[in-house]
Image (cartoon, rainbow, N blue to C red):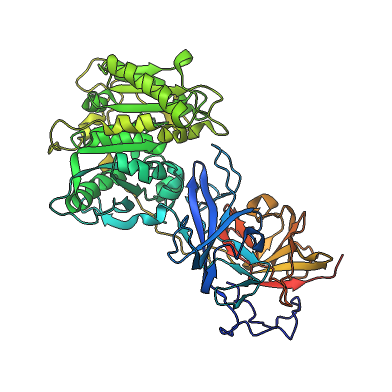
Amino acid sequence: MSKQPGRSEDRSGSIPVHRDSPDFSDSAQFVLPENITAVGIIMEDGLTLAAMRILYSGEIDAGMLTPGYFQVPGRKVIHTYVNNSGKRHHSAQKGVYAFVELLINEAPDSNEFKEIPGAFKFDPRGESWTIELPLIATLRQIKTGYSVDGRKIPPYSRANDDQYIEVIDEFIRDEYTDSETHITIKYNLFVPPSYMKKQEGLADLPLILFLHGAGESGFDNRSQVSSYRQVQEYLKPAIQAENPSFVFMPQCPLTEERSRGVFEEYGWYTYITGSNGQTCYTHPSKSLKAVISALLHNIIPNYNIDSQRIYAAGHSMGAGGVLAALIERPDIFAAAVSFSSAGMFADEMLKRIIDKPVFFTVAGDEGYDIININMPIMMDQLERLGVKLCRFTGANAWNGILRGKDAENDAHSCIAAAEEQKANMIYVEYMKGTIVDIPHLSHRASFENAAIRRWLFQHRLHQPALKMPPLKETLLQTGTGSNVPAPKIAPLHVGVWGMPAGATAGARTVEDISWHYLASPDFCDREKFIVPCCIYTIGVTTESGIAIKALRIKYMGNIGIGVLKPENFVVPCCGIARVYVNQTGEYGEEKENGPYVFLEFLQRDPVLYGEISRSCTLLIAVRQVDTQFNFDGKIIPPFNKISSGQISVSST
């Protein structure tokens, strides 16, 4: 973190400041920022820095620090206000908190201003998962302001000291170890106000179990929340006022088998491999069983939860997990929504849920064959088993671009048609080309749709949850108790889903598989990882001020040339022209390897001088957004850090 304004320090090669600089620590004359918080919100397609909250050492009048007083590299300041509560959007006549609001782009599927999460994996063959990198930004006050009592507020340049992600940081984070599977499940739990503990006199509220996709598996107990917009959709004050509810969001742990691409343990469901080497139907995994155990033994007993209104929702791997959860314990769940599911199940499994209300959606141009081929096949399978299913495809497909009332009205008419047909399951395809950017992310439109949300909440079990036994392993065999052949299933990259009748002899059951759950990586382990230890900005003096020319990152190990490329990094407002390495740390010197990595910029970011005989520090954030592998096999994991110093070079 940078020092507070005015606390000068001598750094060899640093850009000089005036030696007669005032003593800004003199509280009789100056008001200084004591803490800066980066405030983030979850947009439809990712995390966005929305505001900076500054705690000053004295009160400031409203209208004193206008937007023109501040700069945030790469962003536009649109509004400022003060208060004493520290709450966003609360404007007052004066206060010690100042908020700097930033321009954001709320258009669906817009990547503008979004914080790119880190992608991490153990080795080049392994599967990636998401790491939520911290919000780090630089705030510059470029003019002198005045407090209520007339003290000066001098210019400064500082990084945020901490962060607050709206909605996400309102969750309770905890973990639960299942006594049967011995698996520890980390989870987030949203608890409505006044419901922090179970007590008499409170009305019981519904609960939604949300299962994330494969990319959010891991250890941080955050990415399963921060990567999904639907958290906000179900927790917005207006929605909670209409349908107050608990939201339970577990994180699927990772296994060594899965990191090597072995599909026998795949998140919320399991692929069972037969003696012929082919991959059979999916089945509830041990991880999912541990989640259900946490729900039954740790969540429901401790809160006022309506056991007749427990719902399941999920996307991608989580969508298949939703069906697996209903199959495992159909007595628990009143209804479910399953968006872009890849799971396929034997007839005997699906027979357990043919009376359940389930809402399916998928993009008509879904990019994964195992989804866009298998979902219609599963719909055929459900209808063959007697499910009353209403489909909206072809000319009746939905427009995935629509949001708000337009999308809600279209969905409402379709739901009304399904109810008229007495259909308990609904299958919707979005028209091709209407899910912008990535068709697999069609869940964004589905979770935002208020009509689907109301459809979910209207369902309830006819009686409190039964003590129905969990799924038995004998149901793994296709065609058990039926002469109907197994449905034809699309090929999977590692084999074929489904086996012909009679081919299941010798199939491995869930209990035959030994899993080795991975622990959170120790990034300080020098034998495995190379991480940055310090970052310096390289500046040049221009007529309009100081400009950033490059960044120098020193890693804890030698990195080969070409290992790190411009596309591996994000620096606000600075395009990266090239990346090179050397052993000496000298700017402009390029070698085959070395601990110093230079990011040279396409453009310079001018830094305006403050009014009190001092220049703003060249603080800037740099984000490595994905995992890279060094020539010696060591892992270079993602990071988001602020520069720790600055170096001047000759003017150009």
Q: Nearer the viewer, residue 591 or 220?
A: 220
Q: Is residue 528 above or below residue 231?
A: below
Residue 172: x percent and y percent? 32, 56
User: In which quadrant will I find the N terminus?
Assistant: bottom right
Q: Is residue 369 left or right of residue 375?
A: right
Q: Is residue 402 above or below residue 564?
A: above
For the point 52% across and 42% down, the residue is 45
Q: Is residue 335 left or right of residue 516?
A: left
For the point 31% across and 58% down, the residue is 174
Image quadrant assignment for residue 483: top left
Residue 199: x percent and y percent? 15, 54
Image quadrant assignment for residue 16: bottom right
- Residue 473 visible (yes or no): yes
Q: Nearer the viewer, residue 124 or 566?
A: 566
Q: Nearer the viewer, residue 238 or 315?
A: 238
- Residue 219 visible (yes or no): no
Q: Is residue 530 left or right of residue 241?
A: right
Residue 279: x percent and y percent? 38, 31
